[in-house]
Image (cartoon, rainbow, N blue to C red):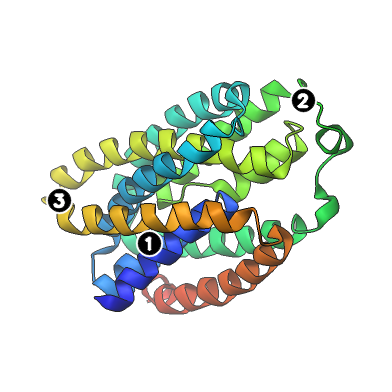
């Protein structure tokens, strides 16, 4: 269990530092370290990440590092998409969900590595000017990321942060704070729907696991927020991207045989 608790700390650190990556770690930790069934782990992941992201967003909100316009355009459509993805999950096997999850991890690695360059922010964000264009693009991506959140249990911060930087014109730190608010909203919606999906299958979440991971992860997110002002984020993103490649390939190896068999 101590290894699992360390995993919970890393989940919080990732969300606090990067505004993403927490749910990418949560599902593998719950399945391979705690021993939870795949669908239960995905549901618990959404509850845990919702709590950690909400707590982690508080320091950013106090520092006025949350763009509420982007929360509206990305978060509200994302809630609808997440609810739909959670509903869709009852028609998809756990092995298929984990294979999709591994593919998402590899995509996350590519996006994180590509946007880890210090020059990733557009000129408007670098100048401290808010961009007000491409609202419809942000809304469409919010729906798409929401569906992904509900289906495979990832908060989608690795997609949200680049979208807020490149489409919304936010600097990296404001994008991270905004991402946390959006992740919290979407994860709550997905978690509530999953409670119904699990109940229909005779399953339920382990509230002790959710509470323990949320508490430890929240502490980690505060530490991550503090470290985020002192460590170059481009280096963190590159290192995390390499880790995601290894983890994604391992999950594919563990589950692809169930599909081909």
Residue that carries the numbered disc 1 in the rendered image: 27
Q: What element carries label 2?
A: loop
Residue 83, horizontal then vertical, whole percent: 37, 33
Q: Nearer the viewer, mark 2 or mark 3?
A: 2
Q: Can you see residue 23?
A: no
Check whether the beta carbons of the residues at disc 1 and disc 3 lie within 8 A of each other: no
**Along the polypeptide, which appears first: circle 1 or circle 2?**
1
Q: Which residue is drawn at 64% across and 67% down?
A: 241
Q: What element carries label 1?
A: helix
Residue density around tag 2, few if under 14, some if 14–19, many if 20 or more, within 10 Å: some
Check whether the beta carbons of the residues at disc 2 and disc 3 lie within 8 A of each other: no
**Along the polypeptide, which appears first: circle 1 or circle 3?**
1
Residue 128, horizontal then vertical, whole percent: 81, 31
Quick one: quadrant of the C terminus? bottom left
Q: Residue at x 71, y 66 (%)?
A: 235
Image position of 189 (left or right of 127): left
Q: Distance between the residues labelled 1 and 3?
A: 16 Å
Q: Is residue 32 above or below residue 156?
A: below
Residue 197, horizontal then vertical, whole percent: 23, 42
Q: Residue at x 64, y 73 (%)?
A: 242
Image position of 170 (left or right of 123): left
Q: How far apart are marks 1 and 2 (CA)?
A: 35 Å
Residue density around tag 3, few if under 14, some if 14–19, many if 20 or more, within 10 Å: some
Q: What element carries label 3?
A: loop
Q: Which of marks 1 and 2 is in front?
A: 2
Residue that carries the numbered disc 3 in the rendered image: 204
Residue density around tag 1, few if under 14, some if 14–19, many if 20 or more, within 10 Å: many
Residue that carries the numbered disc 2 in the rendered image: 130
Residue 257, horizontal then vertical, whole percent: 41, 78
């Amino acid at each position: 269990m101590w290894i699992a608790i360390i995993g919970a700390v890393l989940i919080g650190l990732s969300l606090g530092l990067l505004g993403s990556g927490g749910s990418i770690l949560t599902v593998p930790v719950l399945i391979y370290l705690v021993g939870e069934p795949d669908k239960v782990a995905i549901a618990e992941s959404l509850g845990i990440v919702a709590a950690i992201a909400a707590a982690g967003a508080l320091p950013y909100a106090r520092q006025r590092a949350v763009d509420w316009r982007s929360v509206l355009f990305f978060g509200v459509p994302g809630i609808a998409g997440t609810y739909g993805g959670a509903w869709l999950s009852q028609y998809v096997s756990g092995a298929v969900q984990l294979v999709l999850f591994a593919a998402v991890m590899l995509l996350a690695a590519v996006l994180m590595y590509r946007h880890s360059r210090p020059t990733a922010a557009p000129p408007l964000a670098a100048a401290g000017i808010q961009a007000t264009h491409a609202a419809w693009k942000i809304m469409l991506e919010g729906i798409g990321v929401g569906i992904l959140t509900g289906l495979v249990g990832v908060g989608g911060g690795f997609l949200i942060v680049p979208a807020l930087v490149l489409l919304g014109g936010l600097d990296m730190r404001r994008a991270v704070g905004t991402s946390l608010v959006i992740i919290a909203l979407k994860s709550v919606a997905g978690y509530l729907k999953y409670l119904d999906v699990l109940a229909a299958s005779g399953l339920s979440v382990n509230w002790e696991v959710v509470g323990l991971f949320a508490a430890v992860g929240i502490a980690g997110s505060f530490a991550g927020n503090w470290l985020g002002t002192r460590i170059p984020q481009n280096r963190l993103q590159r290192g995390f991207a390499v880790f995601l490649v290894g983890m994604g390939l391992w999950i594919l190896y563990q589950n692809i045989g169930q599909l081909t068999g």
